[in-house]
Amino acid sequence: MSDRQIKVTLVRSLHGQLASIAASARGLGLRRIRQSVTVKDTPENRGMIQAAVHLLEVEGHGAATRAAGKGV
């Protein structure tokens, strides 16, 4: 599972978010709006994506539906 990659883009501002949500986005390597990073598909990264999914656009290996809680 760790050889798969997920592309994550910050599409909304971190300003005004809870510190834990902002920390999750920063932990993924996202600093600016419209910045994209590619991260490994691990349970740790999926947890950070789930915490900030309302601020992110997620692509790659069906990650968008799973990250939004719409799938398995």
Image: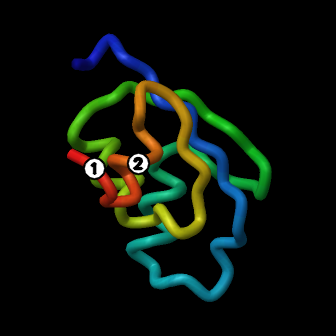
**Looking at the picture, which amino acid does disc 1 mark?**
Gly
Q: In the figure, 23 relative to 30: above or below?
A: below
Residue 25 percent across, percent down from the top left: 51, 57
Residue 10 percent across, percent down from the top left: 66, 54
Say what secondary structure mark 1 lies in: loop
Q: In the figure, 62 relative to 35: above or below?
A: above
Say what secondary structure mark 2 lies in: helix
Displayed quadrant of residue 36? top right
**Residue sitting nearer the eye, 3 or 31:** 3
Q: Along the polypeptide, which appears first: circle 1 or circle 2?
A: 2
Quick check: 23 left or right of 15? left
Q: Residue at x 47, y 30 (%)?
A: 6
Find disc 2 in the rendering and name its residue: 65
Q: Dot 1: within a 10 Å radius of its alpha carbon, few (fewer than 14), some, or many (20 or more) residues? A: few
Q: Residue at x 61, y 50 (%)?
A: 57
**Looking at the picture, which amino acid does disc 2 mark?**
Thr
Find disc 1 in the rendering and name its residue: 71
Displayed quadrant of residue 14? bottom right
**Residue sitting nearer the eye, 29 or 55:** 55
Q: In the figure, 56 relative to 64: above or below?
A: below
Labelled pair 1, 2 in contact (Cβ < 8 Å): yes
**Residue sitting nearer the eye, 3 or 59:** 59
Quick check: 14 left or right of 22? right
Give the label on residue 52, or none.
none
* Numbered-mark total: 2
In the rendered image, which quarter contains the C terminus? Answer: top left
